[in-house]
Image (spheres, helix red, strand yellow):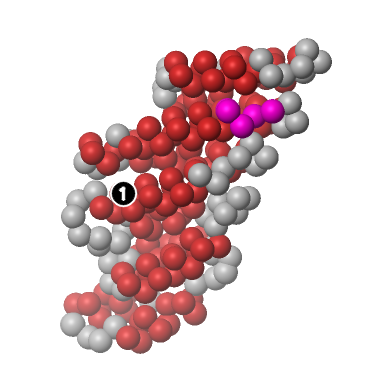
């Protein structure tokens, strides 16, 4: 299908047939083959790919962020125009997802932070790239503030581990202080949870 798309582009043929066929070749939920197809087709049928991406974005939410890293990867293949605009669009999506992250689902935190972190080493303009670590910091701060004694040990362990990885072992002081303040809310019987938090 990708080879056919290249021929259409090379000879300036009408792409309507490709646009109609693309959704039929994509699975729901999307599998690896679907993501590979969307990445390869982003250059040739960008509007159709973006429409499919939007349908997958609409399905994302708390407990359903599994495909967000693939969505942002395809976004960066789309010809959005000005350099950095694709990354900026991905940033907006990740910020929207970050606002829905809560300690009830620590895996959501990991997915969004790791995807934000992936952009920190990308070749994108500083005005955009500097927003990714700031978003990570804001997300981790809000997450730590929301932690309570009712949350699982996994929920408590996750932010410390991610802070260390996202900031190369030197997380902002404000994050460490907030995590410490959150720990003060734990009862003395939560010794195991405290051990999990401070081993990082």
Q: Is residue 157 above or below residue 34?
A: above
Label 1 sits on residue? 87
Q: In the displayed structure, would residue 104 be above or below residue 159?
A: below
Instruction: Please state the horizontal and vertical placement of residue 193, each as a whole percent of the image.
Output: 72, 20
Q: Which residue sits at x=58%, y=65%?
A: 29
- The one nearer the camera, 71 or 131, is 131
Say if 22 sits above or below 122 in the image.
Answer: below
Question: Given the current orientation, which residue lies at the most extreme right position?
Answer: 189
Residue at the image point whose x is 25% and y is 53% from the top? 85
Residue 170 in the image: x percent, y percent? 42, 17
**Horizontal and vertical percent for residue 155?**
66, 32
Q: Is residue 182 left or right of residue 187?
A: left
Q: Main secondary structure of the magenta part?
A: helix
Q: Quadrant of the C terminus?
A: top right
- Could you say which is closer to the camera, residue 75 or residue 60? 60
Q: Quadrant of the N terminus?
A: bottom left
- Residue drawn at x 32%, y 79% is 4
Which secondary structure lies at badge 1?
helix
Front-most of residues 170 and 123: 170
Residue 83, magenta (yes or no): no
What residue is shown at x 37% (from left), y 74% (from top)?
A: 48
Quarter assignment of residue 137: top left
- Please state if 40 lies on the left or on the right of 9 as rendered: right
Does residue 173 appear left or right of residue 187 in this picture? left
Q: Which residues are magenta?
A: 144-148
């Amino acid at each position: 299908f990708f080879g056919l798309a290249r021929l259409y582009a090379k000879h300036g043929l009408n792409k309507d047939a490709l646009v109609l066929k693309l959704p039929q070749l994509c699975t729901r939920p999307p599998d690896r083959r679907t993501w590979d197809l969307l990445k390869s087709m982003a250059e040739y049928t960008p509007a159709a790919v973006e429409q499919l991406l939007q349908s997958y974005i609409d399905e994302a939410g708390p407990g359903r962020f599994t495909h967000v890293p693939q969505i942002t990867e395809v976004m960066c293949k789309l010809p959005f125009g000005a350099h950095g605009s694709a990354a900026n669009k991905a940033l907006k999506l990740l910020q929207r997802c970050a606002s829905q992250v809560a300690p009830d689902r620590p895996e959501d935190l990991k997915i969004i932070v790791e995807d934000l972190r992936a952009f920190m080493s990308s070749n994108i303009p500083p005005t955009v790239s500097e927003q990714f670590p700031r978003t990570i910091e804001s997300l981790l701060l809000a997450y730590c503030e929301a932690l309570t004694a009712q949350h699982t040990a996994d929920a408590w362990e996750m932010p410390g581990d991610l802070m260390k990885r996202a900031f190369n072992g030197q997380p902002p002081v404000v994050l460490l202080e907030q995590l410490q303040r959150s720990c003060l809310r734990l009862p003395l019987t939560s010794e195991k949870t405290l051990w999990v938090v401070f081993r990082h």
